[in-house]
Amino acid sequence: MILIRSLLYLSSMVISTIIMAGLLSIVGWILPYRQRCQIANAWGGVNLWFLKLFCNLDYQIEGLEKIPESGAIVLAKHQSAWETMALRSLLPPEQAWVLKRELMWVPFFGWAAATVQPIAINRKAGRKAAKQVIDTGIERLKQKRLIVIFPEGTRVAPGQRKRYGMGGALLAEKTGAPVIPIAHNAGSFWKRRDIRKYPGTVIVKVGDPIPTTGRKAAEINQEVENWIETTMQQIQPQE
């Protein structure tokens, strides 16, 4: 039944993405920016609802009130595709995501993503990618948007961790924008390279804003990593 339910969910996600991303791709460029973001957020919310309907997978979030409408940098754990939908839906609308540029080439999804002005980087570019995050991130913060980054850069299986990239911390050092850390255990229910979605409740915890004014990027990054990984130990189900 888990496989059948997961296939039903997959079908609903594909259909909703084609419809909503297609709409955004066509009319998004003539809509005000905030309305484009609201459509993108609605896409995330619809798919969270389908996930609960078909797979009995829900979520519980703690600390959402700590996230400001704009002017902050969100650094989140990355375990699955779940958080790409959930954070898009749950955070304030005007978000600028740092994502790999290859996603922009995906039909419908990538075309729609372009309308909400992400920071699309070449992850193999090293320092050039970090500079792009900083330069464009400064511009987006001036436009009163939230910057959303997965500092590990790729999905990491539960119980594992990767080196935290410095892009978000360098942006924080340059701007003094507060950093909001987010931990969650979605990877225990939506596993990498597995079509099955397991029932349960994803636990999401939002940390207190981390002040960055006058601090070095390495110090900021270490505090973010310590908070996220310590919190992961508390919320990660035992496999």
Image (tube, rainbow, N blue to C red):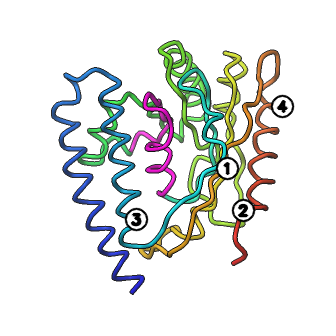
Q: Amino acid at mark 4?
A: Glu
Mark 4 neighbour density, 10 Å: few (under 14) some (14–19) many (20 or more): few
Q: Is residue 89 magenta?
A: yes
Image location of residue 144, percent across then percent down: 50, 17
Q: Earlier in the sequence, mark 3 or mark 1?
A: 3
Q: Would residue 157 be counted in the magenta stretch?
A: no
Figure check: 9 above or below 114:
below
For disc 2, the marked residue is 235
Q: Position of residue 137 (x, y in %)?
A: 54, 22
Residue 80 image point, x, y percent: 52, 59
Q: Earlier in the sequence, mark 2 or mark 4?
A: 4
Q: Amino acid at mark 3?
A: Leu
Q: Amino acid at mark 2?
A: Ile
**Number of marks in the rendered image:** 4
Graded by Cα atoms within 10 Å as few (under 14), some (14 to 19) or many (20 or more), the crowding at tag 3 reads many
Q: Amino acid at mark 1?
A: Lys
Determine which residue is flagged by label 4. 219
- Residue to which mark 1 is pinned: 205
| Mark 3–mark 4 distance (CA, rounded to whole Å) | 38 Å
Quadrant for the N terminus, please: bottom left
What element does badge 1 sit on?
Answer: strand
